[in-house]
Image: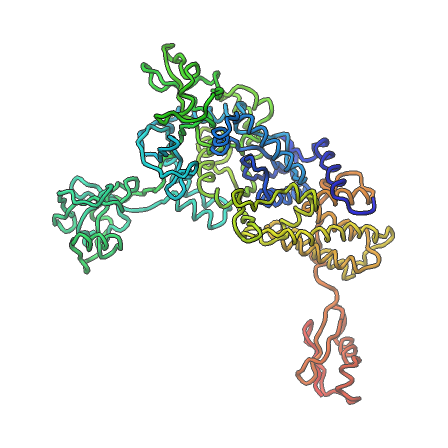
Amino acid sequence: MHGYDPKEIEEKWQDHWQKSGIYEAKDFSDLPKYYLLIEFPYPSGDGLHVGHIRSYTAMDIISRKRRMEGFNVLYPIGWDAFGLPTENYALKTGKDPKVVTKENTDTFRRQIRSLGLSFDWSREINTTDPKYYKWTQWIFLKFLEKGLAYKAKIPINWCPKCKIGLANEEVVDGNCERCGAPVEQKEKEQWMLAITKYAERLDKDLDEVDYPDRVKIQQRNWIGRSEGVLIKFDDIEIFTTRPDTILGATFIVVAGKEDKFTGRFVTNPATKEKIPVWEAEYVMSDYGTGAIMGVPADDERDMEFAKKYKLPIVEDYQKAGFEDFGKKVTKYRLRDWVFSRQRYWGEPIPVIHCSKCGVAPVPEKDLPVELPKVEKYQPREDGESPLANIDEWVNVTCPKCGGKAKRETDVMPNWAGSSWYFLAYLFNKEGFASSASIENWKLQIENFRHFMPVDWYNGGMEHTVLHLLYSRFWNKFLYDLKLVPTSEPYKKRTSHGLILAENGEKMSKSKGNVVNPDTIVKQFGADTLRLYEMFMGPFEQAIAWSEDALVGPRRFLERVWRLKTKVAKGQTLDTDSQGLTLMHQTIKKVSDDIESMKFNTAVSSLMIYVNTLDKKNKISQEEFKTLILLLAPFAPHITEELWLLLGRKDSIHIQNWPTYDSKKLIKDEIILAVQINGKVKANVLVSRDQSEEEIKTMALALPEVNKWLKGKKPERVIVVPRKIISIVT
């Protein structure tokens, strides 16, 4: 093979890697483990896009480096496949969501494999697989058993056109994400998970993990921890973080749908004066106690309210003690998680309703409660799930008393399956297929102990609040049941920036600016696409796509390919040469940059190294070998082929990662500036170990210096070590 043909090379090695199982993690190994995780994709009908590739390639580079460093690496893949887009497609086309999901996952799998990503496919999971969601249902039953799952009548987002309840994330600017109709509020009984019972730990334990500051801030803002005081104004209890302002309180405001005076007065316990009680929209019913004291002089909203309704304003007042009038408490903005959806394409909630026994959990032996086939995916007129239409599925016998009963027809949100998927990868195949029970879960605990916590988790910034919070909550709950070994699931979390369209807009199907990786792989090759996505800009920043810029990485790989003709068998690298120094500097730079996710500067360093090697007539095997070992995580196919052409039989991806010698990082030669009467006139290249006298002799022999001295002897020659030579005439 003479020319660089990515298609031939890439397909060959992808087949080889798949058959060899080279990237499969061992359940138990004497090697230290390293668990890397991506947010598993939602397999939409649009297929994989270049934004997915940015995250997957970055973590693939780290995975490959870790394997070469001697770790038992787990880098798994699966599908987060329940949820709204597939159900919407079913509504439009009448196509079975199971069929749609299979088609989409088949496309994604093919595309991911075409990129040479080193996922452990032996652990592939799918949240819509009954073997998977029986465990999701089992965990829900544990929440129910411990009193953390309950039903409550609450206001929900209601779309009158779709006749469906919507989660907050499905409401965009007050309109339904599905149809665009204005969303109303409607009271409905919903299943809730008591995440608020974990609020303190979810906030405090952020101190234990390596997350970016902005991610911790987002988590903490959502949890909304406030230290304050409960104070009674007669029978109304208010929560305040500023109890010292009580002497300036001139009214009380309770949560309401509109501003109005209630006609009531209560006593301010500090001033003993009667103050009016108002209702107002600006007070949140679900924060604190749903009531506040109005202190116009110290709060902008209170001031606006007081001026609007001509309420008293006390400008100068004494600050009161905290402790004088109330009880110290900690409150959280976090509310319990609305967990049920009136839809079809989700995990059935495994509960049976009996008129005698009330809520009866489905027995473990009957899990999973599988989704039945339905003819229509539309919700009913009363807003109930399409499942409520299937009498033979809904009508069952009560597992407690044997009487007539009905199944729960709500399903779980698509957050459910993604709240524990990092554990699902750790199940052995027998455990995954076995019945959902405490005994069978416990058989997996040794695997959990070996791999948990996740060492490095990367995903989009849009999932650093809810998904991260929910999955931390589920893990903590399982930890309390002694079913997982660590309280926090993820040791380290990082995020990547979006890839924008060429004009800087967000990529979307409706705008027709989505880039299909298939065409790029076909035209340029997978290694070029991987290299380009890592080189295009800082990893955490949003970067615009540029197809023209793919040419640079492709040409770089062609130059690497051609370098093989310069490798000389007998050529060795001098121990004191500049080539050795550059090699060790490149090893250090690429190694450090991968760890800090500075992939663009790592690629840049490799390009500089290739430029230097390309200028030589001959290069040593050691130089070429080091180059392709460093390039291997970025461009796995071309480097595997070049490794074979070097006569190596084992895969390059299981070789030792190159290490640098810190002593070799310092060049043996340095350039010193030569000054004559304070002005730099020349430079001289000297060895670090040369004596002062030798350096003086070399400087005085320079033609530029002789021109100024004109044969005269200088008055003084001063050598400032490793900096400058100063000649005074």
- Give the image location of residue 57, x and y in percent: 62, 44
Q: Which residue is drawn at 47% across and 50% down?
A: 213
Of all residues shown, which one is farthest toward the top? Answer: 402
Q: Which residue is drawn at 72% across and 82% down?
A: 717
Question: Toward the viewer: 519 or 228?
Answer: 519
Question: Toward the viewer: 368 or 27?
Answer: 368
23 displayed left or right of 375:
right
**How are the residues colored?**
rainbow
- Give the image location of residue 324, x and y in percent: 21, 49
Image quarter of residue 445: top right
Q: Which residue is drawn at 75% across and 39% down?
A: 651
Q: In this view, does 695 lie above or below 39?
A: below
485 displayed left or right of 203:
right
420 displayed left or right of 397:
right
Question: Toward the viewer: 269 or 603?
Answer: 603
Q: Is residue 301 above or below residue 371?
A: below
606 displayed left or right of 497:
right
